[in-house]
Image: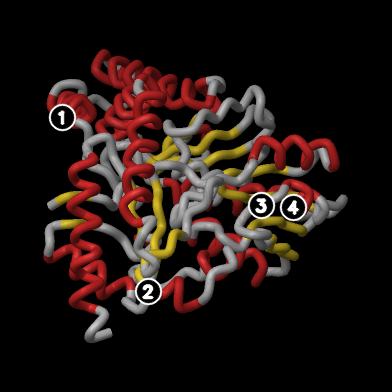
Amino acid sequence: MYYFDNASTTKVLKPAADAALKCMTENYGNPSSLHKMGVDAEDTLTSSRKLIANVFNCKDEEIIFTSCATESTNIAILGVANSKKKVGNKIITTTIEHAATASCISHLENNGFEVVRISPKNGKYYAADIVNEIDDRTILMSIMHVNNENGLILPIEEIAKQAKNKNPNIIIHVDAVQSFCKIPINTNKIPIDLASVSGHKINAPKGVGALYIRKGIKIQRHSFGGPQENNLRPGTEALPSIVAFGVAAKTHMENMNKSIEHYTALKKHLLDRIKDNPEILLNSSDNCVPYIVNLSIKGIRSEIMLHFLEEKGFCVSSGSACSKAKKSGVLQNMGYSKEREDWAIRISFSAENTINQIDMLVDAIEAGQKSLIKTY
């Protein structure tokens, strides 16, 4: 199988898997224990926290570990909203957020919070359109950095700076899942307050994530138990997964520039291969990352093409993995038609994908066009 669904999840790096195994079989103490094995485990936890903090250029204590980015987002959004509800009740977000963010905010809306959802213009987001909605009652803004379905980059630095100038008390949460370790996020330059990230998007195991919380930001806890992770995520830390997460993050950061060059070459070759095929429509613009490409194959439902490609040995996606093949509406919010969203497939790259694999994938798509269009 040739795997082109890396925006959904990724293969665990061998060094990350080796580090996790060592942690499970040798350094298996509880980080909260006072004996030597516990202290060794705590030192390992601290080292891993530092590796994640390095990605954000933040302090170690500003990182808490979670089970996934969805949990991080729940802690962030619900925690801020509940801690600041006496100050105001207005929340600003976009119409293209991942379900983790969108569901949290809908829950708050159903419980009396005012929600403003900003749509893109001509397939882009402009800081002014978001910042203009901020007023004295606005307590929270939650926006993604990179869209998970078509790779659109949102101008979070510009948005955050203008938002803080207009209302210094607003809390800004960023879903950084698809940009983490791929696009630099320097919290000394970008005044965001919270950021959710996930391990399994960067070749770490599933079941580990993190939340960046700028020092001084107050979050009301909604889980109770021990004092772990600044009292926000109680329970014994999943140290093997956390260690693997740190190793994967370090590896990605060391290879970031090389990886971007690789993804850019893959995307360019893919677009060159399809540019003369009028039945293949590109849903990713110049404002998108090079490692996610969204295409619509005219007249063929995405699920049908997906299964055809699978039979040929290729794994792609029909959109967000969390949607279970249900259409999220992201592409329609980007301005594309419902039919175009129904035809869409997402291709997302890893360091292991090659130009030759791109050629074989395009050949398979074109074969699908010839055989499937007759039926569908």
In this view, the residue in front, 253 or 227, is: 253
**Mark 2 touches mark 3? (CB < 8 Å):** no
Amino acid found under the numbered disc labelled 3: Tyr
Of badges 3 and 4, nearer the viewer stands 3
Dot 2 corresponds to which residue? Answer: 298
**On screen, residue 354 above or below 256:** below
Q: CA distance from mark 2 to mark 1?
A: 46 Å
**Mark 3 touches mark 4? (CB < 8 Å):** yes
Dot 1 corresponds to which residue? Answer: 21
**On screen, residue 54 above or below 362:** above
**On screen, residue 67 above or below 370:** above
How many marks do you count on the picture? 4
Amino acid found under the numbered disc labelled 1: Leu
**Mark 3 neighbour class, 10 Å CA radius: few under 14, some 14 to 19, many 20 or more:** many
x, y (%) of residue 130? 74, 52
Q: CA distance from mark 3 to mark 4?
A: 8 Å
- Mark 1 and mark 3 lie on one chain; the one further toward the N terminus is 1
Image quarter of residue 18: top left
- Mark 2 and mark 3 lie on one chain; the one further toward the N terminus is 3
Q: CA distance from mark 1 to mark 3?
A: 43 Å
Amino acid found under the numbered disc labelled 2: Lys
Q: CA distance from mark 1 to mark 4?
A: 45 Å
Dot 3 corresponds to which residue? Answer: 125
Of badges 2 and 1, nearer the viewer stands 2
In this view, the residue in front, 354 or 182, is: 354
- Mark 2 and mark 1 lie on one chain; the one further toward the N terminus is 1
Of badges 4 and 2, nearer the viewer stands 2
Residue plotted at (25% across, 67% down): 306
Dot 4 corresponds to which residue? Answer: 130
Q: Residue furthest bottom?
A: 375
Residue 354 placement, left or right of 202: left
Secondary structure of the residue carrying tag 1 is helix
